Amino acid sequence: MAKSMTGYGRSRSLINGKDITVEVKSVNNRFLDLNIKMSRLYNPLEDRIKQLIRKYTTRGKVDFYLSVDNIDGDKTELSVNHEFVESYVRQLEDIIDRYDMDGDIDVALVASRPETFITKKADEDMEAAWALIEPVAVEALEAYYAMRCTEGAKLKEDILMRLEKLEACRNEISLLAPAAVAAANARMKQRIEELL
């Protein structure tokens, strides 16, 4: 079956609190040129994605886009910045003592400072992430492959139609060729006679 090198496929899935979208598109290229765009968080999956794409195409400039949005919000780890808290409390105590001020230092005051806590995005389990991403990628690649097959069938039909036209032109030329040769010979003979 003839397949076009141009194609497009898209798939989206909402699963386990994640909105996963995969888009694949390609244009003509002599070799396979893969361009994968995704969050750096998922870079460890790049080789798996390349292997998956190679199951569906061997040539063309292929752009693969992966978007994973956490609907429930990013999982974060929260920890106390002990150095800041100790320094902050010491400075507040110093202000109270030095300037003979009234007031209490309470948790609410310390916790209200953004520097009190350190937030860090939790590492994501790549095996679990791949289990969610792979089916979406396969669905997008299947749609991409189907479009390539449809476009290939149209190209094949167009080429066959043009071949039929060329064949008709060739047949017409072959019918007219003997008369054209005879006419050209007669004109040449007439010119020669005129010169003599």
Image: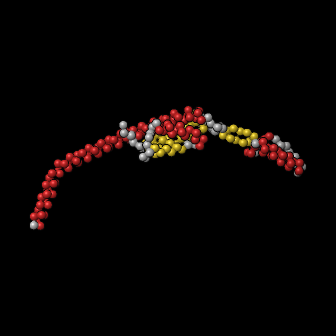
Question: On the rendered structure, is 77 left or right of 186?
Answer: right
Q: Nearer the viewer, residue 3 or 13?
A: 3
In terms of depth relative to the viewer, which is nearer, 178 or 195?
Answer: 195
Looking at the image, the residue that sits furthest to the front is 196
Name the residue located 69 percent from the left edge and 38 percent from the top edge: 77
Pinpoint residue 139: horizontal percent, then vertical percent.
Answer: 48, 35
> Which quarter of the rendering shows the N terminus?
top left
Which residue does the image show at 10% across and 64% down from the upper left?
193
Q: Report if residue 26 is visible in the image.
A: no
Res. 121 visible in picture: yes
Q: Quadrant of residue 146?
A: top left
Residue at the location (44% across, 45% down)? 31
Q: Quadrant of the C terminus?
A: bottom left
Q: Quadrant of residue 129?
A: top right
Q: Is residue 94 above or below residue 144?
A: below
Image height of 28 relative to 194, above or below: above
- Could you tell me how many numbered marks the image carries? 0
Q: Position of residue 179 (x, y in %)?
A: 14, 52
Task: Residue 89: give x, y in percent of width and height.
Answer: 82, 45
> How is the structure coloured here?
secondary structure
**For residue 83, what is the image quadrant?**
top right
Q: Residue furthest bottom?
A: 195
User: x, y (%) of residue 87?
Assistant: 81, 46
Residue at the (44%, 40%) spot, across then down: 58
Q: Is residue 135 left or right of 196 when viewed as pictured? A: right
